[in-house]
Image (spheres, helix red, strand yellow):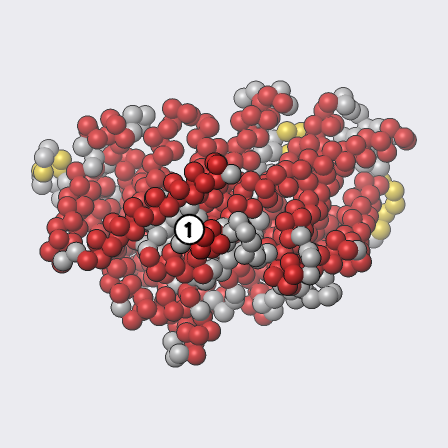
């Protein structure tokens, strides 16, 4: 019992702390928020500095790690968050859209010789289209069926790539062009628009700018009619439909936006890596990104960014534990879900939904309020 | 492109049925846990993997190097099934206790439970790759390699049917799998425990009021699901004679697909879905080439769900049919 109450106390203290931050943030005037936004952006740009790198990533090149997996996971998690966190649709095959973007870049870049920015437009449109194609027939399915269909779709995309010789089969595509460089713009000794092979930092800056743009879009959507519609669908789809929300249309939109973000990241990622193959788009990547979203606090963009950062960074940082890191990661996921199932930084609304057992996914079956259940414990505390 | 299929239709059918029976056994675990908890037990594929490992361990430690005959064969097979089933059932119960029950008690969301399941799945895979295979199986540095397992039952041809050679072990696997499912069906429909399982899946709150011990029912559900996966693991070793730390991954997804195809929560549906999927996969491989068989399986899943969103037989652990 004593260990139990220690855990509960720790849990409550953490909740109180994050709630406090969230409330202060909600009450802060606009100029303060903008200062923080700009500060965060500047910090993101300063991150690749060597002193930070020696602490954060002693085993591998920090700037490379920042691009992949950290930055890549952050953007993918933000995209998946639109689908899972905001619209409440469980997608287990998100990596398929990342693959769409990656293969668009690889194919159009090597075969048609289009440049990075042209492909970015095409790749994003293609990914969004594939989201609509997948969502169109399947979004009428209920939660878990949707999960397994998306999982199936992810595997279909990967294995089709593996079996189609026209796009390289299992060997994939090599010789993908880099984004066009503009040389000579030196900032702090970095040639910031020189997209070469040696220096990963320009790619990281590019990624930060893309991520910032995506975050702005996503936050605007969240606060608009679209975001409110998603919240309504997530909380109670039938009620939303009755209230006149065209649920199918908005679910499809969420899918398309999530897919477009995944595709954009695929294009950026392929623009750096030179060669891609189907195994880069394994199911484990979908699972890891989903873990990042839920771990950080699904539905809350800062939380999701934190979750993605941790999921990407911890295994890199503890490369010293070498092979045991994935095992530790698995155990940590279980422990974190037991300790804090709503995620590290949930939004207040989302937290309330999760406590009620709504929020798109609902709660586990066979749970009956007993003497040791969460609500009873809270009631006793008050 | 159909010549290949038509030319050897029966061999493909037999292989499909054997594979399908194994899918069906594993699917039972998914479908029962889903019926009771509404949880996709993602780590169930690892429970199956543990079953294959335990049976392989039996073959290795007993020093079986060549096919057995007579009583020794019966004893060896029983031991494999017993150890495989026990190992899987035990780990399934442990998994429920560690990874799911704390979440259930807190009323956590199903999404959190799914992440917990994915975490447990990763942990178990790595546990075998890094600890159990190198140290218990005594194969250092080979944790991630495929392990061959000695043949303990001769693959004699009993008779031929339309060009397909039917072997004794195939009949054994198929009959054992179907028999297991019939027993389980009886258990769920005819016994007091089964009534508890059905009641819990229909309405947990009322079930509690009627005196059903939910924790016990959930534990039994995991136990039975694990047992079936372990038996499937032993049969898998018998048929394919290989295992690997990640052997459960694709097979688990297929088995879950089978459960969904048949109508999740429906025991008979799991069997039907498994056989259907096994056949489709083998026919598809015959027509388009073996590289495409998973693509075909998933495409069929998407198509079936589009036109019949609750699976072939419908969801029904809740209803009396179960």
- The residue that mark 1 highlights is A381
Observer-nearest residue: A100 or A111? A100
Mark 1, chain letter? A
Q: Residue at x 32, y 48 (%)?
A: A16
The C terminus of chain A: image quadrant: bottom left
- A280 w.r.t. A361: above or below: above
The local crowd at label 1, few if under 14, some if 14 to 19, many if 20 or more residues have their Cα within 10 Å, is: few
Q: Residue at x 29, y 46 (%)?
A: A17
Q: Secondary structure at mark 1?
A: helix
Indicate left or right for A27 with B233 as reference: left
Indicate left or right for A138 with A257 as reference: right
Indicate left or right for B167 with B117 as reference: right
| Observer able to see residue A224 | yes
Q: Residue at x 59, y 42 (%)?
A: B97
Observer-nearest residue: A237 or B243? A237
Counting from the top left corner in percent of width and height, residue A350 is at 37, 58
Counting from the top left corner in percent of width and height, residue A158 is at 47, 49
Counting from the top left corner in percent of width and height, residue B181 is at 77, 52
Q: Residue at x 61, y 39 (%)?
A: B94
- A178 w.r.t. B207: above or below: above
């Amino acid at each position: 019992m004593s260990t139990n109450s220690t855990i509960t106390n720790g849990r409550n203290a953490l909740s109180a702390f994050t709630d406090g931050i969230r409330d202060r943030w909600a009450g802060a005037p606009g100029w303060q928020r903008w200062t923080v936004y700009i500060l965060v952006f500047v910090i993101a740009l300063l991150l690749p500095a060597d002193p930070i790198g020696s602490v954060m990533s002693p085993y591998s090149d920090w700037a490379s790690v920042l691009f992949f997996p950290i930055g890549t996971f952050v953007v993918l998690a933000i995209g998946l968050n639109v689908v899972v966190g905001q619209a409440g649709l469980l997608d287990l095959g998100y990596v398929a859209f990342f693959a769409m973007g990656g293969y668009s870049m690889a194919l159009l870049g090597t075969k048609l010789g289009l440049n990075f920015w042209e492909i970015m437009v095409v790749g994003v449109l293609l990914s969004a289209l594939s989201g609509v194609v997948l969502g169109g027939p399947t979004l009428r399915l209920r939660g878990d069926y949707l999960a397994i269909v998306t999982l199936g779709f992810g595997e279909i995309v990967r294995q089709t790539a593996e079996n189609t010789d026209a796009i390289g089969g299992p060997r994939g595509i090599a010789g993908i062009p880099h984004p066009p460089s503009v040389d000579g713009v030196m900032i702090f000794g970095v040639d910031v628009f020189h997209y070469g092979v040696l220096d990963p930092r320009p790619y990281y800056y590019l990624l930060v700018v893309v991520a910032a743009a995506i975050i702005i879009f996503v936050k605007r959507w969240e606060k608009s009619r679209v975001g409110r519609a998603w919240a309504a669908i997530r909380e109670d789809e039938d009620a939303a439909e009755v209230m006149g929300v065209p649920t199918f249309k908005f679910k499809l939109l969420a899918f398309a936006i999530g897919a477009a973000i995944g595709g954009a990241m695929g294009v950026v990622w392929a623009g750096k890596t030179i060669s891609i193959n189907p195994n880069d788009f394994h199911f484990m990547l979908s699972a890891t990104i989903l873990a990042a979203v839920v771990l950080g606090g699904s539905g809350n963009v800062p939380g999701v960014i934190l979750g993605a950062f941790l999921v990407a960074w911890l295994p890199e940082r503890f490369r010293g534990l070498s092979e045991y890191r994935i095992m530790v990661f698995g155990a940590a996921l279980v422990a974190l879900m037991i300790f804090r199932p709503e995620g590290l930084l949930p939004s207040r609304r989302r937290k309330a939904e999760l406590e009620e057992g709504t929020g798109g996914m609902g709660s586990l079956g066979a749970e009956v309020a007993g003497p040791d259940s969460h609500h009873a414990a809270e009631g006793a505390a008050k | 492109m159909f010549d290949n299929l038509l030319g050897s239709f029966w061999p493909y059918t037999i292989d499909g049925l054997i594979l399908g029976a194994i899918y069906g056994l594993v699917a039972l675990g998914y479908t029962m846990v889903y019926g009771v908890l509404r949880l996709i037990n993602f780590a169930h594929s690892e429970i199956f993997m543990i079953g294959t490992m335990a049976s392989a361990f039996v073959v290795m430690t007993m020093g079986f190097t060549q096919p057995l005959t007579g009583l020794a064969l019966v004893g060896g097979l029983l031991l494999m099934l017993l150890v495989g089933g026990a190992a899987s059932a035990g780990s399934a119960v442990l998994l429920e206790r560690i990874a799911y029950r704390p979440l259930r008690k807190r009323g956590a969301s199903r999404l959190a439970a799914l992440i917990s399941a994915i975490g447990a799945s990763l942990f178990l895979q790595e546990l075998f790759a890094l600890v159990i295979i190198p140290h218990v199986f005594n194969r250092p540095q080979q944790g991630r390699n495929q392990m061959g397992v000695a043949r303990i039952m001769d693959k004699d041809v009993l008779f031929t049917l339309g060009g397909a050679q039917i072997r004794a072990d195939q009949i054994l696997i198929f009959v054992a799998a179907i028999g297991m499912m019939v027993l389980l069906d009886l258990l769920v429909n005819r016994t007091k425990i089964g009534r508890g399982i059905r009641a819990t899946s229909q309405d947990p709150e009322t079930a509690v009021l009627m005196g059903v011990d939910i924790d016990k029912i959930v534990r039994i559900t995991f136990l039975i699901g694990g047992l079936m996966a372990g038996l499937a693991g032993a049969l898998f070793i018998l048929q394919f004679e290989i295992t690997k730390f990640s052997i459960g991954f694709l097979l688990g997804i297929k088995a879950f697909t089978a459960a969904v195809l048949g109508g999740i929560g429906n025991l008979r549906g799991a069997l039907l879905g498994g056989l259907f999927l096994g056949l489709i996969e083998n026919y598809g491989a015959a027509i388009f080439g073996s590289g495409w068989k998973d693509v075909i399986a998933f495409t069929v899943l998407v198509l079936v769900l589009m036109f019949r969103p609750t699976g072939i037989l419908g969801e029904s652990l809740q209803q009396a049919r179960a």
